[in-house]
């Protein structure tokens, strides 16, 4: 009987998530104020010709669902604003995302805006995975020539020859850090070591839902300037992006978020039913005794 | 003796980063962290050298299982196949992209050569003579422009992308400009100031040509194989593996989350509000859920989490110092005492 | 079949292979599980070498970053000091003594060195991370908005500070808590922690479901149309 229950529950979960995806139902997401702060910051950030935005993709396939969506919406926003972005990672399993996500976003933007081109080297540059954990961050923060520090991009091209990066000199030319990760302690690593004398970067963080309470303490203290809370944060960010840049295609983040909403209702239902069944069983047990 | 040596080495390991933090940046003209990049690379080198440990362990465990056909040899074969496939494809992709980068670097080399000629001439330190060097530059630049023009014409059999078409048009215009520039310069009479625009033109052509090479590389078989490996296997398997947890949390919601006390009721109520506050359907029940969720997260939850964080950080600092001074050696030296 | 279609088909088969575990443990699942481990293990090896050991250590040591111009001159002279990288590299090789029964202790020199490094760097990390946390906790207990007391914000700050103190007190084990009030204060801390844990649980559900929905979306929106497209 317990085995049967288990498989029925699995089926219910699969159905709850699949039906909105098949029907492509999209319900407006709940407002995420922390994501609003991130959006406003990126909307208003002013970039001088020598400055870049640094995006750290510190996530693997295991948390791609949330962090990947966040990376896409923020990168889309930056690319729409034609702000040059340098992508890198301290986590080796993020290496494929550094290549695939910007390509995906650029293709989508070009399909949406015929005649406009988003190009590697001008709009974004992939610095690849950099092994060394905090050593990389503290060394980068103290570097007097970050172009020389990184040396080459992930495709072995000299950064000094890449338009998006060649004018950046010190870490102070990094106007904004967008750190996207669900790994335990990864954000803290940046907050601890990615700073130099007279420079503490503005940080926007994308976290997985499970680490939302962890991230909020840094939002409250001002160590974070904006926060995308899991996929709900990505969906809200995407909704704001659609409002500012209306486009025809369906918003995948919102469809995913709707699907997740149904799954949440199922979980709430399961908790309630489970407790009711437990109380009844306990009463029956007492009555039989 | 061994213990003492390990303790000394452990202490030395932490000394640089400690001193760099506590000492001022400039001590009477002496900059303590002047070679920070190089020293840090040294530390990174020590850590990076561990990469072989995993490889050796895998080969020892799974290689021997496959070799001697022990139980589970088939899955070990799958693991070793995955490893070998991954190593082959990623190394192949690396070499191909490095080749493409080196191709564009030939133009960059000429740009730097031009800049060097100008700098040496201005410093009165031109050896070989200035005219000889300019002649060499012009000859090589002419040859390189023709080579690049030919190489960039190679079309993708599947058709060019919009980016590629744009790049080709751009390169064509830039190459024509460069050709014109080369024709106007004569090795015998051109002054250093005439070489600077040429250097800029070489740089411009290199940038566009690099873009074309990147696009060509993206369409190459080795790049497609890399995508097959990363998207088709690595990401798909990794995501699917961890997504199994969704089924288990649903099962646990039904079987394990029992409200047996006031404390668990408080926890579950908070969880319920947080869940309803972050999904679209919560708004249908009450539009205040997102705000209440926000208050719960920013006020009691943040305060409680911060209290835990501060406590853990203080404990972490003490533990770190105990490790650094080898006071905390019990787990490290078990069996040695 | 194009490369893109092959990639999507393979990803779908791999996903279903993993999900077959939900029915029961089976060889199909085990095959894909081990395939993933093999691929994931290789990732670190290649990229450590490709993105650090080769470009940052080997290239300068071998002088491969020196450009030779057409006239035979070079961009910069060889820097023999880069050979000093051989010292940490040789030191890093001490890790491999773990495979020697007799000399396994030598590996502890390298392990100890890295542990010491983490310990020495911790002080900087602690101050950068925790000081803003402490400063951020000093919230005004009475908040004024244009000269008028903002009761909502004031109560919020009271709750915040009270929670912070009570939870810290709960974890204060330096001396024993005696007396009914001490226990009640600690118990209050535990209650407030439950709110935090509730927030964690509510967020965890979202995190776990998000993992699955991404895969389902892939199967529905990409894999199935590709399968039907290839078959038709």
Image (cartoon, coloured by chain):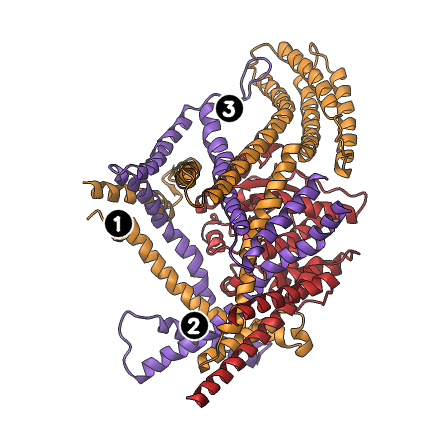
Q: Which chain: red? A: A
Q: Which residue is mark 3?
A: C64
Report whether residue A18 is seen.
yes
Q: Residues within 10 Å of mark 1 (few under 14, many from 20)?
A: many
Q: Which residue is mark 2?
A: C164
Residue C128 higher or lower than A33, as above or below? above
Report whether residue A59 is seen.
no
Q: Tell me the CA gap for discs 3 and 1.
A: 41 Å
Q: Tell me the CA gap for discs 1 and 2.
A: 33 Å
**At 75% across and 24% down in the image, what residue appears?**
B175
Q: Position of residue C133 (x, y in %)?
A: 45, 63
For the residue pair B22 and B264, the one nearer the viewer reads as B264
Q: Are marks 3 and 1 in contact (CB under 8 Å)?
A: no
Q: Say whether residue A242 is left or right of residue A234.
A: right
Which one is closest to the eye, mark 1 or mark 2? 1
What subunit carries mark 3? C
Residue B117 higher or lower than C216, as above or below? above
The colour chain B appears in is: orange
Q: Say whether residue A45 is left or right of residue B174.
A: left
Residue A147: image quadrant is top right
Which one is closest to the eye, mark 3 or mark 2? 3
Q: Secondary structure at mark 2?
A: helix
Q: Which residue is mark 1?
A: B326
């Amino acid at each position: 009987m317990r085995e049967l229950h288990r498989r029925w529950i699995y089926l219910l979960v699969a159905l709850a998530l699949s039906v909105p995806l098949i029907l492509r139902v999209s319900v407006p997401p709940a407002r995420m104020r922390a994501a609003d702060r991130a959006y406003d910051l990126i909307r208003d950030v002013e970039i001088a010709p020598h400055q870049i935005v640094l995006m750290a993709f510190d996530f693997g396939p295991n948390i791609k669902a949330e962090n990947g969506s966040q990376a896409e919406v923020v990168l889309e926003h930056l690319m729409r604003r034609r702000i040059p972005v340098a992508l890198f990672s301290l986590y080796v399993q993020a290496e494929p995302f550094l290549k695939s996500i910007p390509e995906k976003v650029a293709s989508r933007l070009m399909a949406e805006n015929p005649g406009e081109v988003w190009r590697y080297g001008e709009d974004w540059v992939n610095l690849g995975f950099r092994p060394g954990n905090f050593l990389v961050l503290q060394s980068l923060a103290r570097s007097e020539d970050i172009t020389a520090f990184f040396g080459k991009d992930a495709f072995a091209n000299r950064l000094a020859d890449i338009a998006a990066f060649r004018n950046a000199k010190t870490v102070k030319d990094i106007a904004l850090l967008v750190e996207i990760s669900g790994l335990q302690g990864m954000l803290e690593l940046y907050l601890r070591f990615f700073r130099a004398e007279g420079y503490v970067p503005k940080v926007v963080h994308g976290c997985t839902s499970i680490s939302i309470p962890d991230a909020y303490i840094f939002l409250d203290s001002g160590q974070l300037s904006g926060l995308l809370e899991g996929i709900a944060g990505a969906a809200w960010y995407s909704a704001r992006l659609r409002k500012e840049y209306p486009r025809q295609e369906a918003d995948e983040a919102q469809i995913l978020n709707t699907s997740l909403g149904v799954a949440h209702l199922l979980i709430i239902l399961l908790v309630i039913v489970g407790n009711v069944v437990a109380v009844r069983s306990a009463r029956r047990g007492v009555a039989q005794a | 003796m061994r213990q003492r040596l390990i303790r000394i080495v452990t202490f030395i390991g932490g000394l640089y980063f400690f001193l760099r933090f506590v000492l001022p940046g400039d001590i009477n003209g002496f900059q303590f962290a002047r070679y920070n990049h190089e020293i840090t690379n040294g530390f990174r080198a020590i850590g990076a050298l561990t990469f072989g440990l995993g490889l050796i362990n895998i080969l020892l465990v799974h290689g021997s299982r496959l070799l001697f056909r022990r139980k589970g040899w088939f899955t070990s074969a799958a693991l070793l196949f995955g490893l070998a496939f991954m190593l082959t494809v990623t190394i192949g992709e690396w070499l191909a992209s490095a080749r493409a980068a080196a191709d564009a670097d030939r133009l960059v080399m000429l740009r730097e050569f031009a800049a060097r000629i100008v700098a040496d001439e201005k410093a009165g330190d031109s050896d070989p003579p200035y005219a000889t060097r300019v002649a060499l530059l012009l000859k090589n630049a002419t040859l390189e422009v023709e080579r690049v023009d030919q190489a960039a014409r190679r079309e993708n059999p599947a058709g060019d992308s919009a980016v590629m078409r744009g790049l080709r048009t751009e390169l064509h215009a830039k190459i024509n400009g460069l050709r014109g520039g080369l024709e106007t310069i004569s090795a015998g009479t051109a002054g250093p100031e005439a070489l600077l625009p040429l250097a800029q033109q070489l740089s411009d052509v290199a940038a566009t040509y690099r873009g074309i090479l990147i696009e060509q590389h993206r369409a190459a078989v080795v790049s497609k194989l890399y995508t097959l490996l990363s998207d088709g296997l690595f990401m798909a398997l990794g995501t699917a593996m961890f997504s199994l947890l969704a089924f288990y949390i649903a099962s646990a919601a039904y079987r394990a989350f029992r409200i047996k006390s006031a404390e668990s009721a408080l926890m579950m109520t908070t969880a319920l509000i947080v869940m309803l506050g972050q999904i679209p359907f919560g708004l249908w029940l009450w539009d205040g859920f997102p705000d209440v969720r926000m208050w719960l997260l920013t006020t009691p939850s943040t305060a409680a989490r911060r209290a835990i964080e501060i406590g853990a950080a203080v404990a972490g600092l003490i533990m770190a110092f105990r490790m650094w001074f080898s006071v905390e050696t019990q787990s490290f030296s078990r069996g040695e005492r | 079949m194009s490369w893109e279609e092959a990639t999507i088909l393979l990803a779908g088969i791999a996903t279903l292979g993993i999900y077959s575990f939900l029915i029961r443990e089976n060889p199909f699942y085990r095959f894909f599980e081990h395939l993933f481990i093999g691929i994931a293990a290789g990732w670190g090896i290649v990229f450590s070498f490709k993105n650090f050991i080769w470009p940052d250590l080997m290239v300068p040591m071998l002088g491969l970053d020196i450009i030779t111009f057409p006239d035979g001159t070079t961009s910069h002279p060889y820097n023999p000091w880069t050979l000093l990288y051989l010292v940490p590299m040789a030191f890093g090789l001490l890790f491999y003594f773990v495979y020697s029964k007799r000399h396994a202790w030598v590996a502890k020199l390298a392990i100890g060195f890295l542990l010491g490094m983490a310990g020495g760097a911790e002080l900087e990390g602690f101050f950068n991370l925790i000081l803003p946390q402490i400063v951020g906790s000093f919230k005004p207990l009475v908040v004024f908005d244009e000269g008028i007391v903002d009761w909502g914000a004031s109560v919020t700050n009271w709750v915040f500070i009270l929670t912070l103190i009570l939870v810290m007190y709960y974890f204060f084990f330096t001396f024993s808590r005696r007396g009914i009030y001490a226990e009640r204060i600690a118990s209050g801390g535990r209650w407030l922690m439950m709110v935090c844990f509730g927030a964690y649980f509510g967020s965890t559900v979202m995190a776990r479901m998000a993992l699955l929905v991404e895969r389902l979306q892939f199967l529905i929106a990409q894999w199935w149309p590709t399968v039907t497209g290839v078959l038709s």
